Image: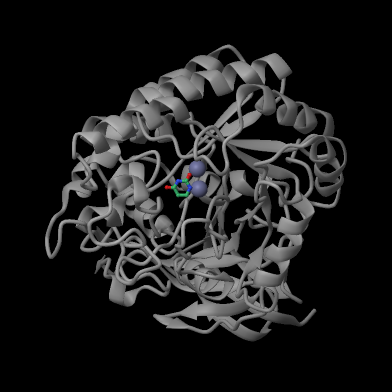
């Protein structure tokens, strides 16, 4: 057998094992794992390095239409380029239904936005913002069957939010069709009430964003989402969990045997609300770290680390939501004196997600390498129906692989990143892990600091139902 590519001397880690092997690849798939494989047309020596499944980022926003005059800085080209350079080989952004429009229109529009642009493979989640009878009875079931098997719902944001009755309706569809529902859990009325009072009192600086969305609004909505899912008897996944009170709700639900899955993100491990208080250059600087839920404090960071290590979280995603700081279509869309309530929510993080967690999680001894793979790749692939094609190193899997350099200390600098955002919230953080080589279906897309991918290499992936074990 002649391999297209052999990766020699790989120390492979999956979500469950660590083993040394050569990896034989033909037509973009892993076809052999073993000792002393026959020669490949091309060979890479990975001696001394971990080789891991490429990251699956199950929560990122690319080129998502906005309704406030802002524009996402990354489209499928720059977003997937950035992902590849940071070791992610599959992204799952959101085809977002606009209220009044059909879900189908959102999916068709999103395919047009992605067409010919992605460097790595991609699937779509849906965002259901207008669950009309037609959506509930026809469109959503049909789309789930066509491979859009997960969707996000919001308990806040005026243009996206569902009330409890609507949530019960969409959860029922998910139950009937076997889809996975991701829930953005924040209490919208509490946020609106607090925001109005803050703005009236002239407390409009970016740091008041955190005061408008305190932990209890997340705790209450998390509890309610769990109750609604329990009533319908359907699994859900609570996204971007930020701190102790929400973790307690999730732990409690899990301890009862409810299928409540959870996600957290780098911003809740590496940022705090004091980042919203930055005022250098101009008073709006803290806007760079405005996301929702907001970053909390050091004690909450520690709770998130413990929950990550202790198995509360199933996935670790970026929630990459890219807005430029400078210009008039990003963070400053409301002008330089805008209140926090007018600043688009979201921060970039596709490229830095894996290096941050590898360094502070694995190399600093908080989680082991198998947990790292599970949290960043395997579990997202399983949850969103892409496993075992994605998310593991196994014969038959796509050769989406990352060879990690853990010998070269680096400092995160936006100038070195490949997104189209003019800042990173992680500027200046030291990391000790970065991909030396990223392979997407056997093609080198990142090597020794050089981006080698091309728009159009990435393919759309229809998703199966969440993985339920071998059949
Ligand atoms: N919050 C979201 O819910 N989505 C995108 C970014 C953010 O901060
Ligand atoms: Zn969200
Ligand atoms: Zn999001």
> Which residue sits furthest left?
280
> Measuring 80% from the left and 41% from the top, which residue is drawn there?
135
- Say which of 370 and 250 sits in front: 250
Specify whether residue 98 is in view: yes
Specify whether residue 296 is in view: no
Instruction: Give how far across and how far down residue 210 sits, in percent.
Output: 28, 37
- Say which of 86 and 294 sits in front: 294
> Measuring 65% from the left and 16% from the top, which residue is drawn there?
230
- Say which of 199 and 324 sits in front: 199
In the rendered view, does 419 fall on the left or right side of 470? left
In the rendered view, does 26 fall on the left or right side of 431? right
The C terminus lies in quadrant? top right
The N terminus lies in quadrant? bottom right
Question: How many dots with numbers?
Answer: 0
> Measuring 18% from the left and 43% from the top, which residue is drawn there?
274
Establish if 241 lies above or below 12: above
Instruction: Give how far across and how far down residue 324 sits, in percent.
Output: 36, 67
In the rendered view, does 187 fall on the left or right side of 53? left
> Which residue sits furthest bottom?
41
Instruction: Give how far across and how far down residue 417 sits, in percent.
Output: 37, 73
> Measuring 43% from the left and 57% from the top, which residue is drawn there?
354
Establish if 246 lies above or below 18: above
């Amino acid at each position: 057998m002649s391999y297209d590519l052999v990766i020699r001397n790989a120390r492979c880690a999956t979500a469950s094992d660590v083993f040394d092997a050569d990896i034989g690849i033909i037509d973009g798939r892993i076809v052999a794992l073993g000792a002393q494989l026959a020669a490949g047309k091309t060979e890479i020596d990975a001696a001394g390095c971990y080789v891991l499944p490429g990251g699956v980022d199950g929560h990122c926003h690319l080129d998502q239409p906005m309704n406030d005059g802002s524009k996402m800085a990354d489209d499928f080209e720059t977003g997937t380029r950035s992902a590849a350079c940071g070791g992610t080989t599959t992204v799952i952004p959101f085809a977002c239904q606009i209220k009044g429009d059909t879900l189908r229109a959102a999916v068709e529009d999103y395919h047009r936005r992605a067409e010919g642009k992605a460097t790595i493979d991609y699937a779509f989640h849906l965002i259901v913002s207008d669950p009309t009878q037609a959506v509930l009875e026809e469109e959503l079931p049909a789309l789930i069957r066509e491979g859009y098997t997960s969707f996000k719902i919001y308990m806040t944001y005026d243009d996206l939010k569902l009330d409890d009755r609507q949530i019960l309706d969409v959860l029922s569809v998910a139950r009937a069709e076997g889809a996975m529902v991701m829930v953005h859990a924040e209490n919208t009325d509490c946020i609106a009430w607090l925001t109005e009072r803050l703005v009236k009192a002239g407390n409009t600086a970016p740091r008041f964003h955190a005061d408008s969305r305190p932990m209890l609004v997340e705790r209450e909505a998390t509890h309610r989402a769990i109750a609604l899912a329990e009533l319908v008897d359907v699994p859900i996944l609570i996204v971007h969990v930020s701190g102790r009170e929400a973790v307690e709700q999730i732990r409690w639900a899990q301890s009862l045997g409810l299928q409540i899955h959870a996600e957290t993100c780098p911003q809740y491990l590496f940022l705090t609300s004091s980042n919203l208080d930055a005022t250098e250059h101009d008073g709006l600087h803290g806007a760079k770290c405005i996301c929702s839920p907001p970053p909390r404090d050091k004690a909450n960071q520690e709770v998130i680390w413990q929950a990550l290590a202790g198995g509360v979280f199933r996935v670790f995603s970026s929630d990459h939501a890219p807005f430029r700081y400078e210009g008039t279509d990003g963070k400053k869309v409301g002008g330089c004196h805008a209140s926090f309530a007018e600043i688009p929510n979201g921060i970039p993080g596709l490229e830095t997600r894996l290096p941050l967690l590898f360094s502070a999680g694995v190399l600093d001894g908080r989680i082991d390498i198998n947990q790292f793979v599970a949290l960043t790749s395997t579990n997202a692939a399983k949850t969103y129906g892409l496993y075992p094609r994605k998310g593991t190193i196994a014969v038959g899997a796509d050769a989406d692989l990352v060879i990690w350099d853990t010998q070269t200390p680096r400092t995160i600098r936006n100038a070195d990143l490949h997104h189209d955002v003019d800042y990173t919230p992680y500027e200046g953080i030291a990391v000790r892990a970065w991909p030396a080589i990223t392979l997407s279906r056997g093609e080198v897309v990142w090597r020794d600091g050089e981006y080698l991918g091309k728009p159009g290499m990435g393919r759309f992936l229809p998703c199966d139902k969440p993985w339920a074990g071998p059949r």
